[in-house]
Image (tube, rainbow, N blue to C red):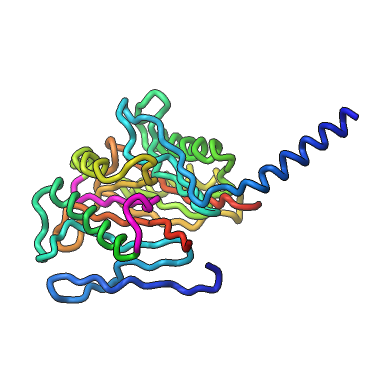
Amino acid sequence: MSGEGPKYLPRMMFRGSALPFSGGVRIGDILYLSGQMGFREDGTLAEGMEGQARQALDNVGAVLRSAGLGLSDVFHVTVMLADMSQWADFNEVYLEYFDEPLPTRSAFGVAALALGGLVELECQAYASQK
Amino acid sequence: MKAYAAFLSVVLAASASAQAPAPAVEYFPAPALNDRPAPFSSAVRVGDVMYLSGAIGITPDGKLPDTFDGQAKQTMENVGAALKARGLGFGDVFKCTVFIADMKNWPAFNAVYVPYFQPGKLPARSAVGASGLALGAQLELECMAHAGKK
């Protein structure tokens, strides 16, 4: 762990262009993921809060899998919602994806998210170097 | 003899805890929120860092104080209680993120926040204006604390 530099996941792609960030960066035992939104592979946003929440969580899962991890390794999440009145709807989907013990979390409404998304999730995962 | 036995038991307890290292990741579940399971743990320790979920100024009877000052004080008390439950205190907090529904309350929050910390030992901090917070709260505070050797 000590003396080892950061490990970068590949740059995120969107509609054929590279986004200005990596999917995640691992430092020691912690993988810091970039914020994930509800974009499908074809670059379109999923429908509504429920669709975007599912897609965002699926996208988080895909980045984690690429690093040999899964959602059960996530220990902290920051939830950004375009409309905080959808907090309860978001929670319903969120709790389908995470089992106890749940990650710690903060959630807040924002003025706007990139490309008009309804939800963005930033996660930190424990990446034990067994 | 009795004193020696007590000394020995302390030594044995210390060596037992030394033989069983704490797990790398330790979760602390949150109590129910308005009679529903909270969608988060109250805290998780990863190595030497204790991550706390964002706290709002909800009182033990599930209500939000009417005033911003009331919510700010209750938020700090809730963070303090979450720290205390893990054997930590404000002196262990090294980073916070402040979410404020109305940024004009930034100075009011600072006035409540600063006295909880020792002079010269304020955590690193960022504050953002939020367009809304859970349950209509005016303030949410997320903290990270050092949970390693003092």
Figure check: B71 above or below A8? above
Q: Position of residue A45 (x, y in %)?
A: 11, 58
- Residue at 47% of width from left, 63% of height from top? A129
**Location of residue B58 with respect to A53 vertically, above or below:** above
Name which residue lies at 34% across and 54% down: B128
Residue that appears at 28% across and 35% down: B135
Residue segment shown in magenta: A68-83
The quadrant holding residue B89 is top right
Vertical comparison of B87 with A4: above or below: above
- Give A66 or B118, whichever is nearer the viewer: A66
In the rendered image, which quarter contains the N terminus of chain B?
A: top right
Q: Is residue A82 magenta?
A: yes
User: Going by the picture, which residue comes out furthest to the right?
Assistant: B1
Q: Position of residue B67 (x, y in %)?
A: 36, 33
Residue lying at the far bottom of the rendered structure:
A17
- Residue A94 locus on image (x, y percent): 25, 44
Give the quarter of the image for residue A59. Answer: bottom left
Query: Residue A26's spot in the image, x, y percent?
Result: 41, 66
**What is the residue that sits farthest to the top in this orientation?**
B61
Question: Is B138 covered by the magenta stretch?
Answer: no
Where residue B42 sits, quadrant-wise, is top left
* In this rendering, position of residue A113 left or right of residue B20: left
Compared to residue A79, the image places residue B60 above or below, namely above
- Left or right placement of residue B61 versus residue B11 in this view: left
Viewer-side residue, B98 vs A27: A27
